[in-house]
Image (cartoon, rainbow, N blue to C red):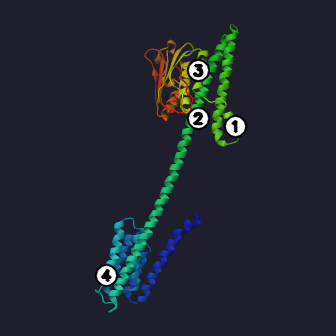
Amino acid sequence: MLRRVQALPWIHTAYDIAISLFVAWTAWTSGTDEDLFIGWAMALALVFRRRRPMTVMVAVSVLALVQYVLSSPAPYDVALFVAMLSVVTHARLMWHVYTAGAVVLLGVVVAFGGFLPFGEQDGDDFGFTLAGACAALWLTAMVLRTRRLYVATLEDRAATAEREREHLVQLAAAEERAEIARELHDVVAHSLAVMILQADGAGYVLKSDPDRAGTALKAIGDTGRDALEDMHRIVRVLRGGRASGQGDAPDADADRRRVSLDDLETVAERARAAGLRVTLEIEGDRGGLSTADELTVLRVVQESLTNVLRHAGPGAEVTISLRFDEDVVVIGVVDDGAGKLAGSRPAADRGTGGNGLVGMRERLEVSGGSFTAGPRLGAGWQVDAKLPVSRQADKPVRTTG
């Protein structure tokens, strides 16, 4: 197919040369010097009929008019019809197409409509026949032109659709990478922050209070196991996860631990074990939320607590307020900064070089929500977010006051 497409320009060139040679041959057989000059000039012009169709049409028309004035119509005047077909087929402007047809039709009327003796008895009939043939040629060329443009339009649409499809695939891949990056950041940053603080606390009280050290070590183990399961879940998504369709066992394993709003108390309890004084206030019906909405709410709360642990440290007091309305979830996380002035650290430092805040904002903006975060007047930090939700009737209702 590729070889055939590459050979088409050579075929066109050979075809044009063949037509020009035919016109030159008919001029050679006419016998007179005028016919030889005019016919060969027409033949030479036809070589360029695809590149400059209207220019060739003008040149051939002028030569045909000169030939009409000097003598009578000759066989090589067929070049005029070839030039007309070239304009109709290849010209870009429609007025060129109509002008070419009108010029040829006018030439036929002038040459065979009684202005020039030709065939005495049958001249009028021949003129009408030739005019009809001219109109038929013009209409045939118009059909070919329309079909060629239609095919070109279809090819352009197909190429555009292909480019759009590739662009959408690239956007989907970029969005998926960003979502996976946010998920990895939330899991790793929160888990490591809790584990580091617990490990430091366990090392501090290891000899003086072995029971507290044991509790801290247990919390480290639980946090590490949950983080490892989250990492396995993310890896399964990267490898195809449930879409792979490889039996029931992988599906059951994938559903072994689904992150949802049920983990809010666990997240708050681990933050308390790490040294924060966490108050969790939930208002409204939190049932019927989609899995994605539940994950977004949980990750915003989790990342906010991670930021408090990293920047305010143990001893900070945090209030988490969640209000579940009919079509929106309002999230508020306020901490007192453990008495540290809010301006003592740049805002961009919150969330591992700003990644935490960026991740929360991206999560909410993808769902059409809003996100603001910044220092409070005096000490502390405040996070406010709104997430539009769509309730699912088939999910269980959980009401917490």
* First of labels 4, 3 by sequence position: 4
Q: Is residue 226 left or right of residue 83?
A: right
Is the Cβ of the residue at disc 1 closer than 8 Å to that at disc 2?
no
Instruction: Give, as a three-letter code, the residue at label 2.
Output: Ile
Q: Quadrant of residue 99?
A: bottom left
Residue highlighted by disc 1: 250
92 or 190, which is in the foreground?
190
Q: CA distance from mark 3 to mark 1?
A: 28 Å
* First of labels 3, 1 by sequence position: 1
Residue highlighted by disc 2: 180
Q: CA distance from mark 2 to mark 3?
A: 24 Å
Residue highlighted by disc 4: 109
- Secondary structure beneath dot 3 equals helix
Q: CA distance from mark 4 to mark 3?
A: 96 Å
- Per the rendering, the mark at residue 265 is 3
Image position, residue 21 (x, y; %): 47, 80
Residue displayed at 44% across by 85% down: 26
